[in-house]
């Protein structure tokens, strides 16, 4: 168990500070799982980031010290980016009625391990301390004592002592230690140990506003993790740097023409940070060597960058394509959101935060589907803005999924939500009306649904078009088949549909003359194979020729066949009639069952040969047609 000896001064300080002494509160986090909101109480008109921090755990139900212990390390990770100077915290827990429940401390050096100091009950004439809620029963509250003291004795001891947490505790100490404690409380507070005249502790001096350069948060959104401010500014190529009379650096978007060695800067009012860049309110004038004023800036400076009003003390994490500055407002690791403030860039060279844009960068699109989560996300950003710019009257809020498209290019295809929000003129509270919003999430989903519907229609059209093309082809085949059936009695006509060969003309020589000259021609003939010579099959019908089988899976033998392919003549060899020998490169070969292939008079066989499909049937063709047009009759079909 860890020791709390190093936290003794802070422990006593936590007991002495009145919980109502703070005039303002910063909403640091909300845990849905633990059902608690976490606030940082601080003095009014002062930065919330101090050391130590005063945390307030406002439970919606019964306060739970174990929940506080679970949340503190997570809050410590958040403080790394939001308040790097915080090294210790004091905390108090409250129930749903706003009554105090417990007090404790934690330190960064101990990895934000929680140490419960004492449980609280409503204060009477004398401050009373109740038992801290733990898993086992505790004794009843004890009578008032002059000063709260810790007793290391076992529980049966009769001495009236306040109940402590399970951690080892320091030895008893008298109440004056509170006054002598060197650690000042965040705000004036009376000592509550015993009745005595109110006595104010010294107020801790708030640190001067400074530029925060946080360690990058430990989570990324769509591959983007907030960079350090130095890296973000270094990546901006549009800045021109120059020094004033005190050697303080300024960054401007104005770059003088000509030799910049003859341009100087003269500033008033600004201070120079430890990094050498101008900070705070003031002005700077860019002067040419001949006394001509080239450019003047008046306002506030952050990292040497000019703002037309007080520059927010937030780290710059990037610039979009319009030079608008993106500043890290806060981060919520539990919800996976980086909240950014976008300061608009003006033509005059200033950055303006009077009506900024608040950006919720997240991959969780479901945050923008229900009104409850939308309002939680929006008002978390507004609450963070109120801590740094409480007088802002108008803002625009956008929820985006990524930085490259959604922010740098301002591409609304990467946006979830957009709304303009202003304060009520009388109450000064923010007015949120969902009727004024653009919910891009639903718009994108509707667009995607419409695109899918159109794609489905196009797919259906393409499928129907293919069916109709096949249907037209099937109808043509059935018409051809019907004609073959009607002409099947005419053997010569049937053969003419099957066969093709070269012809000879006495005057021109015809296609045969082209063969002799080295040409080629299509070939389809009934042949009678009688033998094989030199790897070629010989025929004696319809004339002497040699067949070279080039088609795949063709296994000829002696007999009658229907052969198709390409015919040429041998320029050297002669046939028995002393004519150039006919050579056929066979690509299709069908065996006949009857001499002279008289069986090929069957219309079905002829149709299959013409189509080159041995499995074709009229019924299959009719089915293809009906797939395209179920209710249409086939023209020219003969059953």
Image: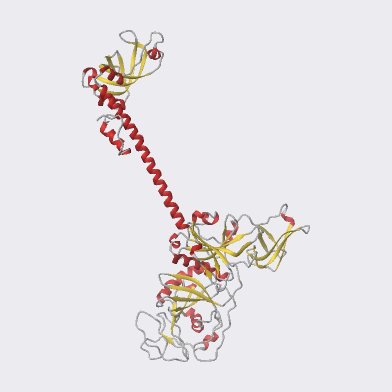
Q: Quadrant of the N terminus?
A: bottom left
Quarter-wise, where is residue 96 in the image?
bottom left
Between 498 and 386, the one lying in front of the other is 498
Whether residue 555 is visible, yes or no, is: no
Quarter-wise, where is residue 328 in the image?
bottom right
Farthest residue toward the right? 290
Between 5 and 209, the one lying in front of the other is 209
Please provide percent x and percent y for residue 568: 36, 16
Whether residue 428 is visible, yes or no, is: yes
Between 97 and 331, the one lying in front of the other is 97
- Count of picture labels: 0
**Colour convention of the picture:** secondary structure
Please provide percent x and percent y for residue 137: 34, 83
54 above or below 341?
A: below
Q: Quadrant of the C terminus?
A: top left
Farthest residue toward the left? 594
557 above or below 257?
A: above
150 above or below 396?
A: below
Between 39 and 303, the one lying in front of the other is 39
548 above or below 414?
A: above
Please provide percent x and percent y for residue 34: 41, 72
- Please state if 488 lies on the left or on the right of 352 as rendered: left
Please provide percent x and percent y for residue 120: 44, 83
Quarter-wise, where is residue 476 in the image?
top left
């Amino acid at each position: 168990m860890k020791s709390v000896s190093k936290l003794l001064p802070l422990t006593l300080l936590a007991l002495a500070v009145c919980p109502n002494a703070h005039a303002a509160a910063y909403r640091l986090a909300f845990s849905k799982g633990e059902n608690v909101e976490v606030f940082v109480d601080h003095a009014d008109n002062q930065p919330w980031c101090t050391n130590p921090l005063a945390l307030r755990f406002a439970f919606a139900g019964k306060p739970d010290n174990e929940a506080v212990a679970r949340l503190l390390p997570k809050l410590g990770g958040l403080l790394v980016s939001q308040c790097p100077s915080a090294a210790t915290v004091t905390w108090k827990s409250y129930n749903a009625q706003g009554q105090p429940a417990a007090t404790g401390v934690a330190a960064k050096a101990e990895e934000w391990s929680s140490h419960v100091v004492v449980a609280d009950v409503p204060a009477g004439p004398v401050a009373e301390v109740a038992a801290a809620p733990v898993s086992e029963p505790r004794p009843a509250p004890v009578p008032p004592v002059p000063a709260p003291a810790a007793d290391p004795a076992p529980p049966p001891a009769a001495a009236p002592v306040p109940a402590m947490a399970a951690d080892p505790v320091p030895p008893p100490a008298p109440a004056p230690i509170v006054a002598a404690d060197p650690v000042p409380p965040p705000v004036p507070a009376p000592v509550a140990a015993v009745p005595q005249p109110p006595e104010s502790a010294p107020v801790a001096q708030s640190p001067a506003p400074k530029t925060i350069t946080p360690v990058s948060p430990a989570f990324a959104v769509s591959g983007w993790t907030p960079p350090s401010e130095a890296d973000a500014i270094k990546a901006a190529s549009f800045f021109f740097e120059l020094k004033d009379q005190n050697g303080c650096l300024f960054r401007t978007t104005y770059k003088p023409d000509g030799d910049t060695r003859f341009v100087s800067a003269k500033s008033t009012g600004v201070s120079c940070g430890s990094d050498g860049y101008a900070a705070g309110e003031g002005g700077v004038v860019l002067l040419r060597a001949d006394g001509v004023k080239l450019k003047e800036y008046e306002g506030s400076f952050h990292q040497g960058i000019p703002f037309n009003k007080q520059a927010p003390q937030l780290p710059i994490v990037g610039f979009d394509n319009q030079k608008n500055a993106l500043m890290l407002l806060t981060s919520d690791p539990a919800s996976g959101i980086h909240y950014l403030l976008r300061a608009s860039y003006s033509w005059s060279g200033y950055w303006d935060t009077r009506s900024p844009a608040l950006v919720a960068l997240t991959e969780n699109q479901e945050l923008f589907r229900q009104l409850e989560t939308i309002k939680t996300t929006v008002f978390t950003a507004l609450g963070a803005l109120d801590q740094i710019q409480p007088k802002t009257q108008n803002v625009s809020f956008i929820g985006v999924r990524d930085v490259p498209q959604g922010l740098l290019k301002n591409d609304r295809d990467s946006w979830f939500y957009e709304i303009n929000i202003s304060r009520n003129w009388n109450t000064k509270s923010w007015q949120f009306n969902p009727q004024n919003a653009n919910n891009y999430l639903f718009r994108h989903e509707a667009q995607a649904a419409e695109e899918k519907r159109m794609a489905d229609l196009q797919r259906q059209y393409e499928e129907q078009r293919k069916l109709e093309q096949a249907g037209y082809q099937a109808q043509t085949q059935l018409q051809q088949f019907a004609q073959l059936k009607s002409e099947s009695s005419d053997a010569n006509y049937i053969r003419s549909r099957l066969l093709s060969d070269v012809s000879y003309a006495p005057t021109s020589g015809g296609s045969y003359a082209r063969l002799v000259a080295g040409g080629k021609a299509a070939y389809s003939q009934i042949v009678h194979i009688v033998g094989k010579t030199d790897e070629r099959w010989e025929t004696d019908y319809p004339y002497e020729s040699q067949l070279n089988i080039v088609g795949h899976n063709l296994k000829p033998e002696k007999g009658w066949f229907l052969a198709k392919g390409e015919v040429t003549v041998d320029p050297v060899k002669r046939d028995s009639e002393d004519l150039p020998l006919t050579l056929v490169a066979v690509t299709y070969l069908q065996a006949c069952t009857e001499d002279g292939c008289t069986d090929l008079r069957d219309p079905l066989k002829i149709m299959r040969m013409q189509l080159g499909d041995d499995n074709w049937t009229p019924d299959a063709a009719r089915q293809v047609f009906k797939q395209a047009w179920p209710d249409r009759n086939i023209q020219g079909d003969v059953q």
